[in-house]
Amino acid sequence: MATLTFYLFAIMLLSILGFVMWSGVGSKRRTLGRGFGVMSFAAAGWLALELYDLVT
């Protein structure tokens, strides 16, 4: 149950971080922010797959 909760909070946090970074926190280095945003979304997707494997 603790693993399930951890995965859910991590997915939520990584999705929020990905959105913030993708929307362009730093206007000078927008490409870098977009790269970190994509990496955050990818990590959230990977955790979602791990959560799916855990539940099924």
Image (spheres, rainbow, N blue to C red):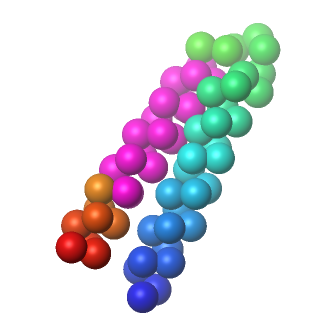
Q: Is residue 11 left or right of residue 52?
A: right
Q: Is residue 40 left or right of residue 25?
A: left
Q: Give x and y (percent) for residue 40.
A: 51, 41
Q: Give x and y (percent) for residue 20.
A: 70, 36
Q: Please say if 21 is above or below 56.
A: above
Residue 28 placement: quadrant: top right
Q: Is residue 49 magenta?
A: no
Q: Please say if 20 is above or below 30.
A: below
Q: Give x and y (percent) for residue 14.
A: 56, 50
> What's the magenta region?
32-48
Q: Is residue 39 magenta?
A: yes
Q: Which quadrant, please, contains the C terminus?
A: bottom left
Magenta stretch, main secondary structure, is helix
Q: Please say if 37 is above or below 29.
A: below
Q: Give x and y (percent) for residue 50.
A: 29, 62
Q: Please say if 37 is above or below 8.
A: above
Which residue occupies 37% across, 57% down?
A: 48
Q: How many marks?
A: 0
Q: Which quadrant, please, contains the N terminus?
A: bottom left
Q: Is residue 34 left or right of residue 45?
A: right
Which residue occupies 49% across, 30% down?
A: 38
Of all residues, the one furthest to the front in this rendering is 56
Which residue occupies 52% across, 24% down?
A: 35
